[in-house]
Every structure is written in C-alpha cells, then in structure tokens.
Image (tube, rainbow, N blue to C red):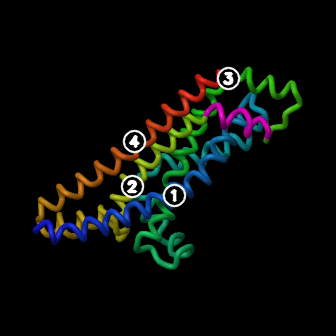
C-alpha cells in the first residue's frame, strides 16, 4: 500500500478517533467528577458522611472498573442501540467509551480531592461556608492540578479504548488497522496507525503536563 493510498485512510481514522475520544471525554468528565466528589463527601468524616450512599457508589464504581472494556462494549450493545439507534460507528462508541471511563475517572477524582489540605476545609466551615461553597471554592481549585492530570490520564485511556472499539465496528484508527492492516497483511499500514496513535497520546500527555506546570507556577505565585 502506497502513502497516497494510506493517507486518506489514516486521516479519516484519526478524525473518527478524535471525535470519539473528545465526546466520550466530555461525558466522562460530566459523570465522573460528581461521582468522585460524592465518594469523598460521603466517606467517614466527610462533609456529607453517609455510609450507605458511599458504599453503594463505591460498589458501582468498582464493578465498572473491574469489567474488561471489550466485555463491557459487547454487553452494552442493547443499551447503545437504545440510546443512539445503532451500535456501529463512532457516535455509537461514545456510549460504551464513556461508561467504561467514568468509574476510572471517578477514582482519580476521589484521590485528587483527598489530597486537599483538610485545614482549608475546616477554615471555610468555621466561616459558615456551605458544602457547595467548600466544593466550589476550596476542593476543586486546590485539587485542580491533580484533576488535570486525571483528565490527561483518562483521555489516554480513552484513546486505547477507542482503538479496541474499532475492532467491533467503532471506526477510527483501530478499525482501519484491523481492516486494512491486519486482514490484508499490510504491515506498513499497521505500523503507520501505531505511529499516529503514539503521536496523539504524546500530544495529549505534553499538553496535560504543560497545563499542570502552569497551574503549579500560578499556585506558587499566589502563595
């Protein structure tokens, strides 16, 4: 396969991969961030201590994290079809990608929030700050560098998931690698898809690291 033949396939695969990753990352952020915060707030000694809620959310998150993505992808076919109308294509893959990543991201958020100095929380409480105020003014700002790192890690995981999703009709670089590389024994095309995936992951990691360093410098300047 010549470069002129590979280029349109790689371009379309890259566009589909970025589309799946971007939208699933946004859904993951919207679902995983509240879950992670809830795990901290309802834990023992938390601002909203509630053992029942904490255990229930923890069990759901643990089950979601323990399922291999390929199994989850297949198990969610009826649900994906119900939501999107099909289980094939990049739009359909957003559903299992997000559901698979939300528990993973929620645990990262929980870890990031736990790193916040409890003394700051107590100080805002002493001034009459409500739970939403503490979350908005203390927990999230103080944990922001760690949260950015969590987002970066989750996006990279989603890139890997999207490649696996391509094997079952998800399009993207994974689908192109299987269809035009593996099945047609085009080793050159397989290598090209791997190089593109590595490049995407590298850019995401560098961008995330840069934002974390910028936030850290701003934090030092503020103090």
Q: Using the numbered discs, state the Cα–Cα distance from disc 4 to disc 1 in whole angstroms.
A: 20 Å
Q: Using the numbered discs, state the Cα–Cα distance from disc 2 to disc 4 in whole angstroms.
A: 16 Å
Q: Which residues are magenta?
A: 133-143
Camera-side residue of 128 and 214: 214
Q: State whether residue 218 is above or below residue 57.
A: above
Q: State whether residue 171 is above or below residue 52.
A: below
Residue 117 circle label: 3
Marks 4 and 1, the one that precedes in the sequence = 1
Q: Using the numbered discs, state the Cα–Cα distance from disc 3 to disc 4 in whole angstroms.
A: 27 Å
Q: Using the numbered discs, state the Cα–Cα distance from disc 2 to disc 1 in whole angstroms.
A: 10 Å
Residue 64 circle label: none
Q: Position of residue 125 (x, y in %)?
A: 83, 28
Question: Residue at point 63% right, 33% down?
Answer: 113
- Tell which residue pokes out farthest to the right in this image: 128
Residue occupied by mark 4: 205
Question: Residue at point 18% right, 67% down?
Answer: 6
Residue occupied by mark 1: 98
Residue occupied by mark 2: 161
Marks 3 and 1, the one that precedes in the sequence = 1
Q: Tell whether label 4 touches label 2 (CB within 8 Å).
A: no
- Tell which residue pokes out farthest to the front in this image: 221
Q: Tell whether label 1 touches label 4 (CB within 8 Å).
A: no
Question: Residue at point 74% right, 36% down?
Answer: 137
Q: State whether residue 212 is above or below residue 72.
A: above
């Amino acid at each position: 396969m010549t470069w002129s033949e590979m280029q349109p396939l790689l371009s379309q695969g890259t566009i589909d991969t970025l589309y799946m990753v971007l939208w699933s990352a946004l859904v993951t952020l919207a679902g995983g961030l509240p879950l992670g915060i809830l795990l901290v707030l309802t834990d023992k000694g938390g601002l909203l201590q509630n053992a029942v809620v904490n255990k229930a959310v923890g069990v759901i998150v643990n089950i979601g994290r323990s399922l291999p993505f390929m199994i989850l992808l297949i198990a969610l076919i009826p649900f994906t079809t119900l939501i999107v109308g099909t289980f094939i294509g990049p739009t359909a893959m957003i559903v299992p990608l997000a559901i698979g990543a939300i528990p993973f991201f929620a645990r990262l958020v929980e870890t990031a929030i736990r790193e916040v100095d409890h003394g700051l929380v107590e100080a805002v409480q002493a001034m009459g700050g409500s739970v939403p105020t503490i979350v908005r003014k203390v927990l999230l700002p103080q944990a922001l560098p760690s949260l950015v790192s969590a987002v970066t890690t989750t996006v990279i995981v989603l890139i890997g998931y999207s490649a696996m999703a391509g094997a079952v009709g998800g399009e993207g670089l994974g689908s192109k690698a299987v269809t035009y590389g593996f099945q047609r024994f085009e080793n050159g095309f397989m290598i090209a898809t791997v190089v593109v995936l590595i490049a995407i992951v590298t850019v995401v990691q560098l961008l995330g690291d840069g934002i974390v360093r910028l936030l850290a410098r701003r934090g030092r300047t503020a103090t």
